[in-house]
Image (cartoon, coloured by chain):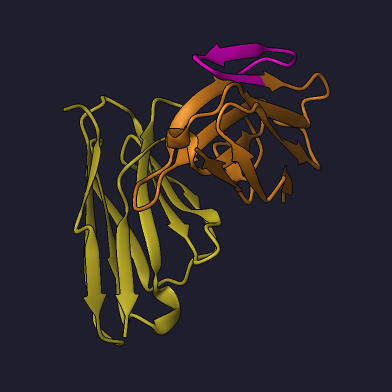
Amino acid sequence: GQQLNQSPQSMFIQEGEDVSMNCTSSSIFNTWLWYKQDPGEGPVLLIALYKAGELTSNGRLTAQFGITRKDSFLNISASIPSDVGIYFCAGQPRAGGTSYGKLTFGQGTILTVHP
Amino acid sequence: DTAVSQTPKYLVTQMGNDKSIKCEQNLGHDTMYWYKQDSKKFLKIMFSYNNKELIINETVPNRFSPKSPDKAHLNLHINSLELGDSAVYFCASSLGRTGRYFGPGTRLLVL
């Protein structure tokens, strides 16, 4: 099955700094999603990417769907304390085959922001 | 509020018991899922239903049985609970293959 490697596993940054995290896959995905999970809550969808090369922003967040279809990154600019949480990437293969509809999650990046 | 809701939020029970978790979405989505998040926060798909039909059934013990009475509901029944079943279970929904929208989770602790 697909393998997703998300890095870094954790980050400790100062408020105001920019953050970058990425995911790489051993196989091709047709959809990349980025989620944030706050303690005691479910993951919340931040950005969805559906085309190779696509660059999408959501406020201070920017994510890109890699040209090879095997990677994606998420940038957070000018971090603030409420950015704290676990960020997950997730990838979904193309339609058809036994993997259809299966969303594979990365291991998560734990972000800590010091005021 | 439009959302994915699930009950209960916390579930503490003895080994060997049978329990159910309920999920409802009012987003008009046609696909619903159950995910399990372990102690290391890894999220893994368990089941997926599209228009009440089972489309994904991962390698999950058959003690776990999902039931979808209609497109807006997907319940999870667990028989003969074991210690290793302790985890957070998330319901999610989507419109086709688009991004999943997750519920708040059910924290299951088996003693």
Is B9 inside the magenta-drawn segment?
A: no
- Residue B36: image quadrant is bottom left
The picture places residue B24, in percent across and down from the top left corner, at 21, 42
Q: Mark yes or no: residue B103 visible.
A: yes
Is A82 in front, or is B45? Answer: A82
Q: Residue furthest front?
A: A115
The picture places residue A104, in percent across and down from the top left corner, at 61, 44
Give the vertical position of B80 relative to B105 (above or below): below
Q: Residue at x 77, y 38 (%)?
A: A24
Image quarter of the C terminus of chain B: bottom left
| Colour chain B is painted in | yellow
| Colour chain A is painted in | orange
As drawn, is B4 to the left or to the right of B48?
Answer: left
Is A91 in front, or is B47? Answer: A91
Q: Residue at x 29, y 58 (%)?
A: B106
Q: Mark yes or no: residue B99 visible.
A: no
Is B110 in front, or is A82? Answer: A82
Q: Which residues are magenta?
A: A50-63
The picture places residue B2, in percent across and down from the top left corner, at 21, 27
Is A55 inside the magenta-drawn segment?
A: yes
